[in-house]
Amino acid sequence: MFKGKKIVVVMPAYNAAKTLRKTYEEVMAQEIVDLVIIVDDKSSDETVKIAKEFKKAIIHTHAENIGYGGNQKSCYRLALENKGDIIIMVHPDYQYTPKLIPAMSSMIGNGLYDCVLGSRILGGYALKGGMPVYKYIANRFLTLVENLFTGAKLSEYHTGYRAFSKKLLEKIPFNQNSDDFIFDNQMLAQVLWSDYTIAEVSCPTKYFPEASSINFKKSVSYGFGCIFTAIQFRLSKMHIISPKLFLF
């Protein structure tokens, strides 16, 4: 709890057996987390078996693999059903440190923001943490384009470390978004469309073999998807098109 607000951490999991326990233990070490929701997207390893050993966790499994975006939809739906006031997504691959949970929670719990991102770019942590140079360059290029079209000034749009207020998640029609990786980008576009201010905190990250990462082909597809979403945002603001992404 933070000032009477229930804090729920959601973990979209897929083959995270090697890092799940360490991530969960560090999440619970923050002491303010009331509940962890782990959604497994049809893993082929022991992710579910390990998750079932955790005391303060709800485990939800998909019968079929539906994708990263589809996994998040389940995460947020379950978080709202369990009356979470502050919902924080932490990847179970231990790439993002759970030690920022109290800081992110306080920014929402004190009524300052409804969306907080853990940025790998602020503070120069991306390359220091081992982000491949080509991914860093792509991140910076896409962020530049997206800021240009949305009018925002974010340091990055591609972090998987995100915190939301209950009010915001109830307003954003995230179920309309893609089940693929572009879900993340579409959701931030919807937050900006609703005129919410997005806060960022500097987040140390780690890149290592067990950390999840999408392949080059999917990265290219994701990149084009980001640009397309940004263009849709600008054309919608100009009342030229009306995609369902922003019909709310």
Image: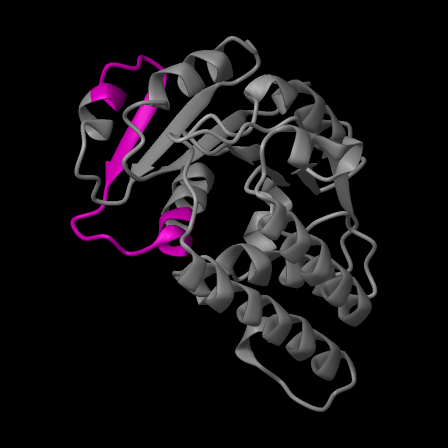
- The C terminus lies in quadrant: bottom right
Colouring of the image: one colour
Residue 46 in view: yes
Query: In x, y percent, where is residue 134?
Result: 60, 52
Q: Is residue 52 placed above or below 164 in the rendered structure?
A: above
Residue at x 67% of width, y 53% of height: 137
Q: Nearer the viewer, residue 236 or 171?
A: 236
Residue 172 in sight: no
Who's the residue at 56% across and 51% down the image?
170
Q: From which residue to which does the magenta span run?
A: 50-72
Which quarter shows the N terminus? Answer: top right
For the residue pair 91 and 219, the one nearer the viewer reads as 219
| Location of residue 158 in the rendering, given as x and y in whole percent from the top left corner | 60, 50
Q: Position of residue 229 (x, y in %)?
A: 61, 72
Q: Is residue 78 magenta?
A: no
Which picture quadrant has residue 144? Answer: bottom right
Lateral position of residue 103 relative to residue 112, left or right: left
**Quarter of the image holding residue 37?**
top left
Q: Is residue 221 above or below residue 188?
A: below
User: Which of the pair 116/207 is nearer the observer?
Assistant: 207
Horizontal arrangement in the rendering, residue 225 relative to residue 216 (left or right): right
Give yes or no for residue 56 being in the magenta stretch: yes
**Residue 132: image location, x then y, percent:** 57, 43
User: How many numbered circles does the render carry?
Assistant: 0
